Amino acid sequence: MLSIIICSVQKDLLSTVKQNITKTVGCTYEVIDIDNALNKYSIAEAYNLGAKKATYKNLLFIHEDVAFHTQNWGEALVNLLQQTDIGLIGISGVTYKTQHPVTWSMVPQKYYRINAIQRWKSGRTEKIIQKDHDTKPYSEVVVIDGVFMAMRLDVWQNQPFDEDHIKGFHLYDMDQSLKIGKSYKIVVTHAILVEHFSQGSTNAIWIKESLKWHKAKASHLPLSVKPISSKEKRHIAHYALIGFCFVLIRNNCNLLAVLYWFKAFFIVPSNKSNLDALKYLLKNTLNKK
């Protein structure tokens, strides 16, 4: 038995995903859609409102721009949720999250754990399968992506989405992962294949919210499933900082990009990406004059 909660902004997408769920879920379920076409609610408010209406003890929060490719996936999800040491289930996540203000995915790809089909902005579609074991039905992670977030009702009741601090539509997935991860395992399931039709955006609003959230959570980061060496931590930190530089430059936050470029440079001075980022920064700055 599964309560599926969707924060909806497009009726056509909602209708399509409901049809897909009906054809594939394979268990008793309900869809609770929160109409947010007018942005009345933050994502945290919408999800909490939906969870309060839930009939069943297993909750799934999903985006409306998805399609399930696995038959009877609902039964597989409910069975996994019965493992009481697991508190949160996703289809995409990472085994390491840096302390720097970047997306969960801004780590080297070897730290990804994914079971999804992604449609990129370029129009390309890619099936991505990356897991720990060939035989185990899930991989343990520290953070999952918000496109698919499953938890039991009692877990949500103890750790509802943070309406007080998550005011928009970003960071809710990392925030929920950090909170639930203190008491439970967080996993990516490899028994359910989901296609996601869009990418997240790292715009000026995301930058502002990310800086604020990472500052507030500084004492809780970085997080790792397994211990890693200091050298590897430096490598990941440099990777994240350079990636953040490019995000800042694309959003014309050039002065802030300079600050984070120097942070990256002092961690790993002899890296080609330092020069690549610097060239991009200079080009962007000159084009503005």
Image (cartoon, grey):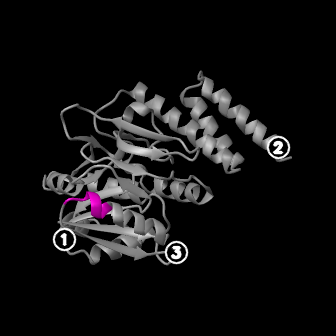
Q: Nearer the viewer, mark 1 or mark 2?
A: 1
- Residue 56 is tagged as 1
Asked whether the residues under the numbered discs 1 and 2 touch, taking CB atoms below 8 Å apart as contact, a structural biologist would say: no
Q: Is residue 258 left or right of residue 123?
A: right
Residue at the farthest right position: 289
- Residue 39 is tagged as 3
Mark 2: secondary structure:
helix
Q: Start and end of the magenta stretch? A: 21-26
Report which quarter residue 261 is drawn in: top right
State the predominant SS element of the stretch in magenta: helix
Mark 1: secondary structure:
loop
Asked whether the residues under the numbered discs 1 and 3 touch, taking CB atoms below 8 Å apart as contact, a structural biologist would say: no
Q: Answer few, some or many: residues within 10 Å of disc 3's Cα (few below 14, many 20 plus, some between 14 and 19).
A: some
Q: Give the mark nearer the N terminus: 1 vs 2.
A: 1
State the separation of the CA atoms marked 1 and 2.
Answer: 56 Å
Q: Is residue 171 magenta?
A: no
Mark 3: secondary structure:
loop
User: In this orientation, does residue 191 appear?
Assistant: yes
Question: Which quadrant of the figure contains the N terminus?
Answer: bottom left
Q: Is residue 235 left or right of residue 260?
A: left
Q: Nearer the viewer, residue 248 or 25?
A: 25
Q: Give the mark nearer the N terminus: 3 vs 2.
A: 3
- Residue 287 is tagged as 2
